[in-house]
Image (tube, rainbow, N blue to C red):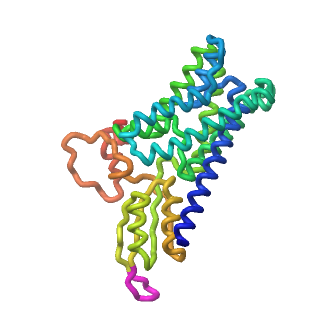
Amino acid sequence: MQLSSKNLWISYKDYVMIILGIAIYSFGFTAFILPEKVVMGGVSGLGSLVYFASQEYLSFDIPVAVTQYSVNLILLAFAYKIVGKQFVLRTIFGATVISLMIGIMQPLFYELLQGKPLVQGETFMNVIIGGISCGIGIGMAFTHNGSTGGTDIVAAMVAKKSNVSIGRTMLYTDFFIISSSYLLFQDINKIVYGFIVLFAASMVADMMINTNRQAVQFTIFSPKWKEIATAINNEANRGCTVLNGIGWYSKQEVKVLLVMCRKIESVTIFRIIKSIDHDAFITQANVNGVYGQGFDEIKLKMRPNDTRPLKPNENPEEVASPTGHPESLA
C-alpha cells in the first residue's frame, strides 16, 4: 500500500508540473510572441498562421487554440496505430491542456493589453522572453514525461517508419511553418524573429531536459537486483545486463546491473531504483553515442571490399570514408 501511495503521489506531481509547464509556455506565447505577429514553429505556429489569415481574409477570427487542438486530434488519429496507445493517451492530455490554456490566455491578454505585447516597442526583447518561456514550459513538460503534441507526433511517426531522427524531422517541419509566414506578411523580419524564438526555445528546453540525442549509462549495485532489473524491463521498457563482480573489501560476490537509456528516461530509471531499494549504490555517466536496437543506427558509407580488421584505437567512422573523414548517408 505504501508503494502504491508513493507512485500515486509521483504521478500526481508529474501532472501538476506538466500543467505548470504548459501554463508557462502559454503565457510566453500569448503575452509576448502572438501580439508581435511572429510565427513560431510547431502547431502553435500553424495556429498563428490560421489566426492571422482569418483576421486578414475572413470576417471572423479563428483562435489559435481551435486550430491547434483540431490539428493535434487529426495527427493523433493517424499516429494511433504507429506510435501506440500509451503515447497517444499521454499526448491527448498535454494537447488538451495547452489548447485550454492558450484559449483562455489569448483573449485575456488581448483585452488587458489591447492587442499589444507585454513589453511594448521592444520586438526583439519580446521574442527572446517568449522563446525562453516556451522553452522552460516544454522542458518542464518533457522532464515529467509529458507531451504537448504538435510536431512531436509527426516526428514520432517518421522515426517509426524511417531512419530520419526526431530532431531533424521537427527542424524541417518548424522551418516550413515559420517560412510560410512570409506568404502572409511579406516581411522577412517576421521570419527572422520566428527563428529566434525557435532557437531560444530549443536551447532552453535542451538545457532543462538535458538531452541532445545523448544517452545515459547506469551502473547499479543492489541486493535487490532481480526486482530492479524486472521493473526496468517492464516499466521503463529498457534492457538490463547483469554482470558478476566481487567486492574486494568484503570479498563477496555481487551482481551489477548495466542499463542504457535516453537522458529523458533517466528520471524514470532513478524512480524505479529508489522505489525498490532506497540504499542502492548508483553511478550515472553520460554516453555520447549508443548504437543498436532501441537507440541510434550507424549510417556510414563503407568502402567496397574493405574487410580488414581495425587497428587499436582506430575510429571506424574514419575508416569508412576514402578521404579519411566521416561520411554520413543521412
Whether residue 55 appears in this view of the structure is yes
Q: Magenta part of the protein: which range?
A: 246-254
**Is 247 in front, or is 208?**
208
Which quarter shows the C terminus?
Answer: top left
Drawn side of residue 128 relative to residue 3, left or right: right
Residue 191: quarter of image: top right
Q: How many marks?
A: 0
Say if residue 327 shows up in the picture.
no
Q: Is 55 drawn above or below residue 85 in the view shown?
A: above
Task: Give the residue at x 37% y 61%.
Answer: 239
Q: Quadrant of residue 83?
A: top left
The magenta stretch spans residue 63:
no
Q: Position of residue 307 (x, y in %)?
A: 20, 49
Residue at the (72%, 28%) spot, across then down: 107
Q: Residue 164 at what x, y percent from top left? A: 39, 37
- Which quadrant would residue 311 be assigned to in this image? bottom left
Q: Is residue 246 above or below residue 17?
A: below
Horizontal arrangement in the rendering, residue 167 relative to residue 118 (left or right):
left
The residue most toward the left is 305
> Residue at the bottom extreme?
250
Residue occupying the point 43% across, 40% down: 156
State whether residue 126 is above or below residue 11. above
Where's residue 150, x and y in %? Answer: 52, 35
Residue 230 in the image: above or below residue 165: below
118, 121: nearer the viewer? 118
Which residue appears at 51% of the width and 53% of the height?
264
